[in-house]
Amino acid sequence: GFEGAAKALKANGITDVICCLTDGPFARFPSKAMLPDPELAKYAEPDPLTPMLKALHAEGIRLHAWMALGRLARADAATVAKFEKEGRLSLGLDCKPNKEKFLCREDPRNIEMYRAAAAELIARGIDGIHLDYIRYAHWSDCYCERFKKLYAARGGQNLADWPKGVDGNKGIDPVWVETRTAVIDGIVKTMREEVRKHQGVEFSAAVFDQPATVKVLLGQ
């Protein structure tokens, strides 16, 4: 159980644990902001976060919530279809959802979902928020109307033949790169602002090395 695991961790000098508690639109705890994670069905306890926190804190171990933002790798067809119908998926060069399904980075509904879930976790007593997937899924996304407007607002000129005019396979548009980076920065700032409302809660993130390259490739 959680108590035995927590004691073993303490005995081996572990002071902090990072546990994946949100994955895309799914929460591994009772949440009003996100959908219930299918993994929850495997637990006898409907809310495993409660005994996990209790056991870890009893041993003086801090628990950080690992939040994997936006990915839909574990979503079933019905869930993907739901988000597609709502216009919340990332779009490729054909202006259709990419094969590697991801939630749109520009959609304020998605960003609010992440922020609200983080607030729920902090209210539960989490010691830190750790972000992952704070980037675009790959080179060729997102080309939705929301991104097009952001690109134009930053002075982007290749609008006549959208999105072919900003196809990175044909040449790098600096404004396109900067727009993607600004979107990701905005998500991180939103999450950081939520965390900073609560004294003592740590904020961290998983990022790639080679930042100059990853900025162009993934907007990070």
Image: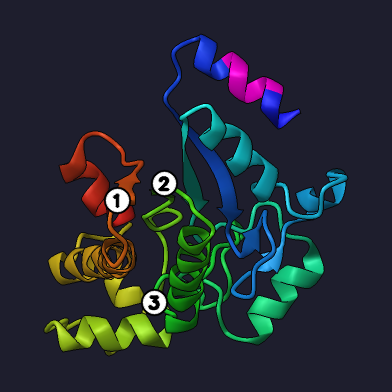
Q: Which residues are magenta?
A: 4-8
Q: CA distance from mark 3 to mark 1?
A: 30 Å
Q: Amino acid at mark 2?
A: Asp
Query: Quadrant location of residue 184?
Result: bottom left
What x and y, as percent, mark residue 74?
Answer: 70, 52
Q: State the separation of the CA atoms marked 3 and 2.
A: 28 Å
Q: Is residue 145 visible?
A: yes
- Residue 106's disc is 3
- Residue at image mark 1: 200
Disc with the residue nearer the chain's start (3 vs 2)? 3
Q: Residues within 10 Å of mark 2 (few under 14, many from 20)?
A: many
CB atoms at circles 3 and 2 under 8 Å apart? Answer: no
Q: Amino acid at mark 3?
A: Glu
Say which label, 1 or 2, has the lower sequence index.
2
Q: Earlier in the sequence, mark 3 or mark 1?
A: 3
Q: Looking at the picture, which amino acid does disc 1 mark?
A: Gly
**Residue at the disc numbered 2:** 127
- In depth, the one of 199 and 137 nearer the eye is 199
In the image, 27 versus 165, the foreground residue is 27
Q: Position of residue 52 (x, y in %)?
A: 64, 40
**Quarter-wise, where is residue 96 in the image?**
bottom right
